[in-house]
Image (cartoon, rainbow, N blue to C red):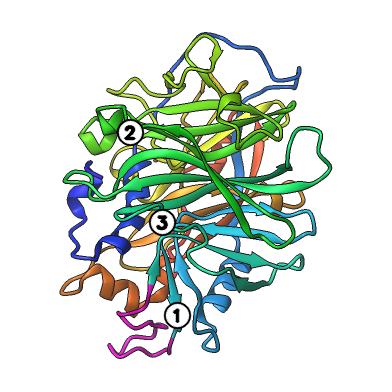
Amino acid sequence: MPGDAHARVHTRRRAGARLGLALALVCAAVLVTVLPRHGLQDGGTCTARTVRSWGADSGLDSEFARYGDDPARTDDWTGGDGTHSVRLPDGRVLWLFSDTYLGRVHGPPNPFGEPYAWRDVSTPLVRNSGVVMSPSGSLVGTLPAPLFPDPGPGRWRWPVAARVEPRSPGSTQQVVRVLLWNRATGPYPWIYGVPTATEVATLSLPGLRVESVVRVLDQQRVPDPSRRVLFGTSMVPEGGWTYVFGGDDGRAAGRPAAGAYVARVPDGRLDRPSDWRYWDGSAWTSRPGTRAVLGDGRHTGVGSAFTVVRDEGTYVLFTMAAGTRGLTTLTSYWACAPNGPWHGPAPGLVAPLPGGEVAAYNPQAHPELGGGGGLVLSYDVNWLTAAGASAQEALSRNVALYRPRFVTLRLSRGREPAAARRASGVWRSPRRP
């Protein structure tokens, strides 16, 4: 999508593969806005949250590299973005990805004389996939891909947040609900697709078979595509509700910032459109005309690819930083309620990245993986520029450029210790080789 960072991205990558970088550009601008006061959730203790410490999670990084590079696999996941996860009742973790490369990885070295594992440029790319991790933390298989079929010619589905919930209210049978973004091809500036609808897929347990896909919010009648809201970038269950966060594509239309939105749904009813309630600025309403909880469309806002977690009584939002650091630096905000007001930003975290012109984007929390008080956060990595090479070639000659990276964060209450940040206000980590 257009923006300051987009001017630096010059690729001829085929349309399917280019979609990965869209999330980076959607989530590049985040500032804070102050809305009317709203109460705490269930009387929880709400205080400011900042990142006390963090470090690369080499275990998860290595596991995805091991699985993606396995030369014995001919039709499994080798790379993707849009990384989301959900813990299943039997202890497995289902990982969901948007644009995904399947096939075999070769090397190293590669045909270009570089010390990188590589894939053939004709490697298949599908719009979405699901990868299963065992309870012990080993990736064990890719579900038949694409997991969620295209709804029609020129249309596709990107899976976003997911959760396990009762099949229906009060039911003892559980299913997996997966939020889907439905998008369609469109003219410039919609080179990454026009947002059309939010859907909810139901997957069986334990087999993870797609049982149904229900459209919960159709946005096609909103005449300005940049004002259409897609929900599901993050979900937070709390007090019998699932709070579902989403965003618009305002930056595609050249607005300095997009907006962040929130809806809520009773437990067990994510697939029932009539039970969704949207925050309109003063109340929860069944009318889909929503109001942003972050963003005024001019100077403040957040794109659609952010993540929210609840730490005791505090909601913490992670996103890419605004401005020129938007493709390298993550930042955070906090609030006492999902509908705000949101406070921040905190000093940024410079994401560990491979060498070269690459971007970090789409931060996503994985609270089901954390231990000992740590919070696992992933971010996606994509190629920006390379002299004499198309994006398709760049992602093929170094397969590590299109896989998630992981860090483990530790949060603290109150302000961040001054000794933990540099004079620039950015915590840095060495770049990876």
Which numbered circle lies on residue 220?
A: 2
Residue holding disc 3 = 150
Element assignment for label 3: loop
Image height of 404 relative to 238, above or below: below
Residue 129 falls left or right of residue 172: left
- Given residues 350 and 62, the one toward you in this image is 62
* Mark 2 residue crowding within 10 angstroms, few (<14) / some (14–19) / many (20+): few
Image height of 119 relative to 351, above or below: below
- 257 falls in the magenta region: no
- Given residues 361 and 202, the one toward you in this image is 202
- As measured in the structure, the alpha-carbon distance from the residue carrying label 2 to the one carrying label 1 is 35 Å
Which numbered circle lies on residue 103?
A: 1
Which quarter of the picture shows residue 116? bottom left
- Residue type at mark 2 is Gln
- Residue type at mark 1 is Gly
Q: Are marks 1 and 3 in contact (CB under 8 Å)?
A: no
Element assignment for label 2: loop
- Residue lying at 43% horizontally and 63% vertically, measured from the top left: 431
Residue 59 falls left or right of residue 205: left
Q: Are marks 2 and 3 in contact (CB under 8 Å)?
A: no
Q: Quadrant of the N terminus?
A: top left
Image height of 412 relative to 364, above or below: above
- Residue lying at 49% horizontally and 46% vertically, measured from the top left: 180
Q: In the rendering, at what x and y percent does residue 368 appear?
A: 70, 50
Q: Which stretch appears magenta?
A: 106-124
Q: In the rendering, at what x and y percent does residue 228 appear?
A: 34, 31
Could one spot residue 308 in this view of the protein? no
Mark 2 or mark 3: which comes first in sequence? 3
- 114 falls in the magenta region: yes
- Given residues 384 and 14, the one toward you in this image is 14
- Given residues 69 and 51, the one toward you in this image is 69
